[in-house]
Image (spheres, rainbow, N blue to C red):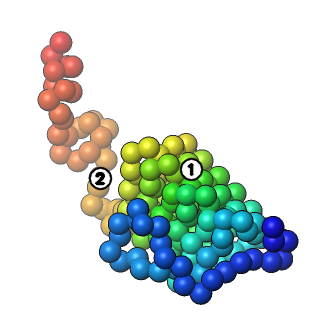
Amino acid sequence: MASSNEKRISSSVAIPKNLNSSNVQTANSRIGKECHFNGSLEFVGTTQIDGSVEGDILSRGELVIGETGIINGCIATERVKIFGQVVGNISCTKSLEFHSGARIRGDIKSPSIVIHDGVLFEGQCIMPVKDDSSVKTDKVNGGYEGGHSTEYENNEHNS
């Protein structure tokens, strides 16, 4: 097992086969499943973590947390794809994906969030809107401008 100052990184690692994303090809770096990293991690590009990280992760790129990956810390990056486990808040500027088997405990914030079947998620979710004027709330009209209600809501009021 690597000490806290050591890490195993390879120059190019294939993303897991069950990741069917056409825009992701290979990782620039990887923390292997037998590796434990303690401290803040910063990178540019794509990084895959199959081992464990104790500390915050900051990136201008994409983070892939493999099935054996365990993160105990906050994540701030452009894109995250999670197959493993995260305990900590996650903030993405572009997209966040939780794949089957992922376990997340912490608050998440991203303009695009995909949660597949078989994910365990405990926390709050915030999806920022680029133009806050596009969605206006109005408590009198059911919460949203226009006051449209569903058939279920109409039936509830008529009962």
Q: Amino acid under label 1?
A: Ile
How many neighbours does mark 1 have within 10 angstroms: few (below 14), some (14-19), or many (20 or more)?
Answer: many
Residue picked out by circle 1: 104
Which label sits on residue 151? none
Q: Which residue is identified by label 2?
A: 136
Confirm whether residue 129 shows in the render.
yes
Q: Nearer the viewer, residue 147 or 61?
A: 61
Q: Regarding mark 1 in the picture, which secondary structure is present there?
A: strand
Q: Position of residue 17 (x, y in %)?
A: 42, 66
> What quarter of the picture does the N terminus occupy?
bottom right
> What is the x, y in percent for residue 125?
47, 50
Q: Position of residue 85 (x, y in %)?
A: 60, 53
Please name the amino acid that badge 2 sits on.
Answer: Lys
From the viewer's perspective, is the residue at label 1 or at label 2 nearer? 1
Q: Residue furthest bottom?
A: 11
Judge from the rendering whether residue 109 lies leftward or rightward of residue 54; answer left or right: left
Quarter assignment of residue 49:
bottom right
Which residue is painted at 47% across and 72% down in the image?
15
Crowdedness near tag 2: few (<14), some (14–19) or many (≥20) residues, C-alpha within 10 Å: few
